[in-house]
Amino acid sequence: MSETSLALPPIGAPLLSLKNVCKSYGEKRAVHNLSLEIPRGSIYGFLGPNGAGKTTTIRSIMNIILPDSGEITLAGRPLDLSMRDRIGYLPEERGLYRKMKCVDQLVYLARLKSVPRAVARTRAREWLSRLGLSEYGDRKVDVLSKGMQQKIQFAATFISEPDLVILDEVFSGLDPLNIELLRDMIVEQKQRGTTIVFSTHMLAEAERICDAICLIEGGEVILDGSLPKVRADFPLRSVRAAWEGELQPPSDLPGVIHSELHEGSWRLTLHEGADPLALLPRLQAVGVLTLYSANRPSLNEIFLAAVARRRQEVAA
Amino acid sequence: MSKVLTVVGREYLERVRSKSFLIGTVLGPAMMAMFIVLPILVADRGGEDQRTIAVIDQSVGVRGALSDVLVEDGRKSLSLEPVAVGPGGLDAAIAEMKTMIVDGTVHSGMVVPADFVETGQVSFYNKSVSSLVVRDEVLKPALNRVLREERFARAQVPDSLFNYLSAHTEWSSIAVTAEGGEEKQDESVSIAMAFVLIMIIYIMVLIYGNHTLTAVIEEKSSRMVEIMLASISPGEMMLGKVLGIGLAGLTQFAIWASAFLLVSQRGVSVGGLTLDVGFLTPVILVSFVMFFLLGFFLYSTIYAGVGAMCNTVQDSQQFHMPLMMGLIIPMMLLSMVLRSPNAPLATALSLVPLFSPVLMFMRVCVETPPLWQIGLSWVLMGVSIWLAARAAGKLFRVGILMNGQAPTWATLGRALRS
């Protein structure tokens, strides 16, 4: 077995590219004309609500389903079977062979990525000790807690030291401690030069670790680029405010396009170019102001705005 | 290819190391022995009831002669109970005998009239169909002999003439070998041996076919399938699984075969049945290995395809019956093939890939068919395996997307056509 090696592009240049990928299930259009470029060395957030087409796109990349049309290239070469050895994949639907020893499991999955046996053995032991699971190496997966199993799956994804890793809803079903642990490890892998595609429907989670994102909805890209660029495209501001006696903001505030009560304070979304400071006197006029802050928009807000903008474009 | 070997290795080791493999290897021959030997033993011995037959004998000495013949034939389980004709006459005696039959003190009864030797007439009283078996298989031949001997005696035929007249033909069978040589033959041994070998193919195909089905479903129930397919093509994965599980089956069989050969240098004999290894001519031996392997992999691959569409073992149950049919139908056709192994119908059916492991192999055992037919059946089975493997890979890809819903024949057909 020899490890396939790729001539990787420089950091920041596109590593994985999708061009006009389409996939339908019968009448239902799951992914439509989807094009995106994932820069090498980044954590790339692949975002969208449930059912937006994220998993279909990822499965197309992994050749688990065949797209109806479109082109997928890795480091400029059309993706073929042998190149999948350079891609790690942790699907949303994931498990382990219950009757297999942890270390054997890791070695097996590494071998399927063409890692030589001896190397796989060494790396498996290293990963187990890094995850604090050394003493479980020769135990069967059966005896592990769910959190431990998630860690093993995580190790199995990275054990082949892939150039690109795709993580689909990796934090779902994990407790905050384990989320923290895995998040640190994802960042660590990025620092080692691994490109990571981080697919999730939890935009707040993506906002914390992603360098670049792509928002999809209804099988189409509605927004993509580096996080600073995306924010520059949506110079929305939001203002949070709260009053003593749980008062409400007036409905005719200038520049406010949306207001909602969120976790005990009012969140006011301003349209482009509106000055949050201009609002302050009006808010103080309502009553005793206990909270005022002007924030850059969250990914959630950007997503909602992008969807609204998109719909206007389609309607026009 | 090396990835296929990795899968083969895992599937093989997982099975061979499991406790159920060990248990199966030890208990397998015991089960086989039970299936084959037990019916023979039962039929031979313990099966017979102790039966009493009431006899009203108005002749002179027929009952005594019948009793002697029965003892001579080794019918120890059958005894005769004389019922005397008292002052009430024959009718009263018959009435008494009927009461005995009804209340179960005797199994059945017979009346031998005074002129039995002249007329050969005898009446048989019974209340159950099973007594007719006793009548036809035991009493009738015995009484025939009594009658014959009595008539010879009355005609004052000397013993030497009697023996000369009542002689039977004696046959010895000589099998002509391919080289024109001669060989002593015992056809009951050949057929028994053929049945044993077919049963081995049949049982191994069923057990390990099912293993393959479960193993493929395991990929889904353990939710490994997407992780696997990110590394290996579905076809390669299927191939690895079928080969790995197949090798485990062969290992088990090899253990059994060598144990059998060690225990019995020539063969074993149980009850009336002899298993003679000498029956295994090179053609039969090669055919056995080929039909075993091809049948095994054909069914395993088909089972794998079914497993690919199912999320749970329960889902797969509706597909079991049609699959079993592929093995049951040839079993039902066996006696036809046995009687006329080279008839056009037998030839045609034995070439059907799903039937070949049983039917063509039976033909090889009883009367070696033209070699091209054996070869053709191997080619057809090989092609079927290839087609089934492709279909299984395809079904697997489709099956992944069927989360939760149980497959139907319609979805199966659609998936294969797509």
Image (spheres, grey):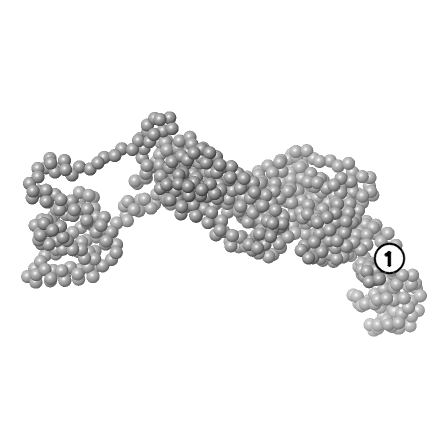
| Left or right of A157 in this view: A12 | right
Q: Position of residue A46 (x, y in %)?
A: 76, 52
Q: Residue at x 82, y 42 (%)?
A: A13
Q: Is residue B373 left or right of residue B169?
A: right
**Residue toward you, B349 or B80:** B349
Residue A257, given in percent of the width and then of the height, sits at: 86, 66
- The quadrant of the picture occupied by the C terminus of chain A is bottom right
Residue B364 on image: x %, y %: 41, 36
Q: In percent of the image, x 64 and y 42: which residue is there?
A: B233
Q: Secondary structure at mark 1?
A: loop
Q: Nearer the viewer, residue B95 or A288?
A: B95
Question: Looking at this view, is B388 or A231 the one in front?
Answer: B388
The residue positioned 22% from the left and 59% from the top of the image is B127
- Please state the total of marks drawn on the protein image: 1
Q: Quadrant of residue B106?
A: bottom left
Question: Is B181 situated above or below A67?
Answer: above
- Does residue A178 appear anywhere in the picture? no
Which quarter of the rendered picture does the N terminus of chain A lie within?
top right
Quadrant of the rendered structure where residue B101 is? bottom left
